[in-house]
Image (cartoon, rainbow, N blue to C red):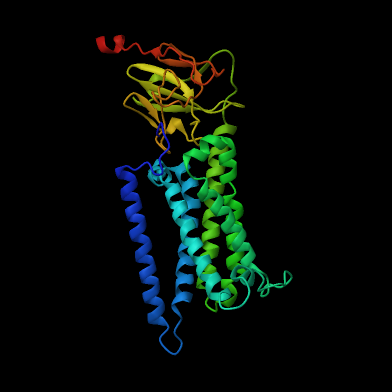
Amino acid sequence: MTSSYQWVQWNTHKKVYDLVLVCAIVAYLVLFFAVSIATHPAPGDISPPIIAMRALSTLSVILLHIILCIGPLSRMTLRMAPLLYNRRHLGVTFFILAFLHAIIAILFYGGFGTRNPVSAVLNSYHSFGSISGFPFEILGFLALLIFFIMAATSHDFWLANLSPRFWKSLHMMVYLAYGLVILHVGFGALQAEHSPVYTVALLVGVIIVSALHVIAGVHEARRDTNAPAAASPWVDVCSVDDIANNAAKVVCLKGRERIAIFKHDGKVSAVTSVCSHQGGPLGEGRIVNGCITCPWHGYQYLPDKGQSPPPYTEKISTYEVRLEGRRILLNPSANAPGTPVTPAIIDDSRENTE
């Protein structure tokens, strides 16, 4: 997180992430060119622009599937958090590769006539009722337009000024764009492929993405469905011993947002488990240097105040807690974001004397 807008908030992790990403992209493109040239010798060789289009398109589709798999996987295991942390870097990189594919296609197929290249390519097919004559380029253009909007608004400046809710809704259009990409490939490149390899690979990708989202959705829905009712004014949620130090237990109550109960420095505090940045799961994070740290993008909040440490200004809802012996009782009524709440003090004196 940052108190001022920067183009890229560089740190060691992001530099390593981007270096690995660039090296992987270069290796894929070089290998694709080498294999394509080796498997298509003269006179059946393929022109470099065609190879470039195929290399960029296949790589773009692979990256898109990886991007869409990171979200649901992160709901199943925190090991995916490092990938989720820099997913926007991956998304912008994907857009650049897809855009290069579109530029080469437009110049190669529409740049040698008297018509505008873009118009020539988009109007090359006219039969919406025919699979072989379907104007698949329009589908790709619409998908690219959505990806452009997402890439252009990926910076936190837009997230803050559009509001997190609107920004998230805007970026949920990725699923519409994904569907357009699948149709673009299905009505386009796959029509000219005699080998079933690409078709099978695409179907496997769609199945994997769909299955992971369904599994993650069912997993999250079960947590909320099995949640107890929010009795008033206090709910017995767990024992102090159920929570690791500097970690949290996420409490699900029917009809309410998830609440994170943190144990830290011999105290217990409760805040919403929803990060104000992008709705990240605060309860799956840890307290680092005295601050609750979101596992998605590192946003931090003071556990007893629900406020980010100065000079940051983000705020989240807080909850009142108290202890009866070792049991933690929670008041399920949320306080206004940023409302200070006195933590419950854990009395370990009896244990220390035993």
Who's the residue at 63% across and 68% down the image?
A: 136
Who's the residue at 62% across and 67% down the image?
A: 137
* Viewer-proximal residue among 110 and 200: 110
Residue 222 visible, this orientation? no
Q: Residue 219, how many percent across, how many down? A: 53, 40
Q: Residue 81, how many percent across, how many down? A: 40, 42
Give the left or right position of residue 113, taking residue 247 as reference.
Answer: right
Image quadrant holding the N terminus, namely top left
Q: Residue 343, how many percent across, how many down? A: 41, 14
Image quadrant assignment for residue 11: top left
* Viewer-proximal residue among 345 and 60: 60
Identify whether 118 is placed above or below 277: below
Image quadrant assignment for residue 5: top left
Give the left or right position of residue 354, taking residue 104 as reference.
Answer: left
Residue 156 visible, this orientation? yes
Image quadrant holding the C terminus, namely top left
Counting the numbered discs, the total is 0
Identify whether 7 is placed above or below 161: below
Give the left or right position of residue 58, taking residue 140 as reference.
Answer: left
Image quadrant assignment for residue 178: bottom right
Task: Point out the residue furthest to the right here.
Answer: 129
Identify whether 232 is placed above or below 40: above
Q: Residue 14, how many percent across, how many down? A: 34, 46
